[in-house]
């Protein structure tokens, strides 16, 4: 019996085997959770299905498409959760995106459309997903919401640009959501892991040098592993 036995978790943001969200799905699976995993569009569907098939609870995993900028798709996800599991106990938010051209240019040249897209996908999506989760969690006596951030939210990192601003908005959203939902016995937290080579990180120019700097200076002389983030 794992610590999440009998709990239902929605995990958003799995792209491939390097995704932090995927590592979290694996850890939750080991601890006995029933999982709902979403994927972004047909391009990622096959990959996510192959990954989900490796979980011990694969026969019960609910796989659903979810464009986090589309309220109708978010509603459909929660409708499917209600129908299959009757509710949700925890939400893992791992969605983040910024247009590559806005990461390559100086921050002051960020396009209006690119700024709006990065903030919508990387920060507002947490609010949108939380809004739908709250009634279900309340009905089950409480819940937990976790998102993923990075040090670029509080410090200026070369080439992180608009994503850093989006992560700052995300962290601020976590504080306000936690204040709103604490009285409902729903916890809201962000994990700010070190640099990890994920699909999202690959869009940041010079990311390999950030990884090496971390290895040179971190007390353990290595970067954090996705499974360590998942265990947290």
Image (spheres, grey):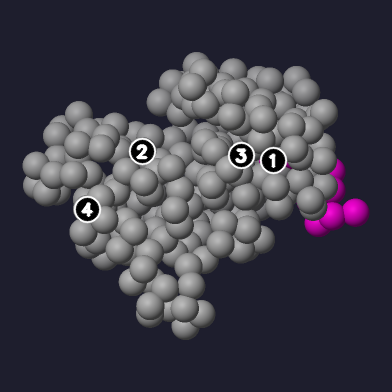
Q: Earlier in the sequence, mark 1 or mark 2?
A: 1
Q: Quadrant of residue 212?
A: bottom left
Distance between mark 3 and mark 2 Cα atoms: 16 Å
35 or 216: which is nearer to us?
216
Query: Which residue is drawn at the image coordinates 65% and 20% (left, top)?
Result: 79
Q: Which residue is mark 2?
A: 97
Q: Are marks 1 and 3 in contact (CB under 8 Å)?
A: yes
Q: Is residue 3 magenta?
A: yes
- Left or right of 40? Residue 171 is left
Q: Name the quadrant of the N terminus.
A: bottom right
- Left or right of 178? Residue 81 is right
Report the label total.
4
Look at the image and give the residue range highlighted in magenta.
1-9
Extreme residue in the bottom direction = 219
Is residue 179 in sight in this rendering? Answer: no
Q: Earlier in the sequence, mark 4 or mark 2?
A: 2
Q: Earlier in the sequence, mark 3 or mark 4?
A: 3
Query: Which residue is drawn at the image coordinates 30% and 63% (left, top)?
Result: 209
Q: Secondary structure at mark 2?
A: loop
Q: Which residue is mark 4?
A: 159
Distance between mark 1 and mark 4 Cα atoms: 33 Å
Distance between mark 4 and mark 2 Cα atoms: 14 Å
Q: Earlier in the sequence, mark 1 or mark 4?
A: 1
Q: Which residue is mark 3?
A: 11
Front disc: 3 or 4:
4
Q: Name the quadrant of the C terminus.
A: bottom right
Q: Residue 177 location, x and y as percent?
A: 48, 49
Q: Which residue is mark 1?
A: 9
């Amino acid at each position: 019996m794992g610590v999440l036995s009998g709990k239902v978790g929605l995990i958003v943001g799995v792209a491939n085997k390097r995704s932090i969200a995927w590592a979290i799905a694996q850890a939750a699976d080991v601890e006995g959770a029933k999982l709902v995993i979403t994927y972004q569009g047909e391009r990622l569907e096959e990959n996510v299905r192959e990954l989900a098939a490796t979980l011990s609870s694969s026969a019960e995993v609910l796989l659903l498409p979810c464009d986090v900028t589309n309220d109708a798709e978010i509603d459909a996800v929660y409708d499917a959760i209600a129908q299959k599991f009757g509710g949700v106990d925890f939400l893992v938010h791992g969605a983040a995106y910024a247009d590559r051209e806005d990461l390559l240019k100086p921050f002051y040249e960020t396009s209006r459309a690119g700024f709006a897209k990065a903030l919508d996908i990387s920060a507002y999506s947490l609010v949108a997903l939380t809004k739908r989760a709250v009634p279900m969690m309340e009905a089950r006596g409480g819940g937990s919401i976790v998102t993923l951030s990075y040090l670029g939210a509080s410090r200026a990192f070369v080439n992180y640009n608009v994503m850093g601003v989006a992560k700052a908005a995300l962290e601020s959203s976590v504080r306000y959501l936690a204040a709103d939902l604490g009285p409902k016995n729903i916890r809201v937290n962000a994990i700010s892991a070190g640099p990890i080579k994920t699909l999202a990180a690959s869009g940041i120019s010079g990311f390999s040098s950030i990884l090496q700097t971390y290895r040179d200076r971190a007390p353990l002389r290595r970067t954090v592993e996705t499974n360590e983030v998942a265990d947290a």
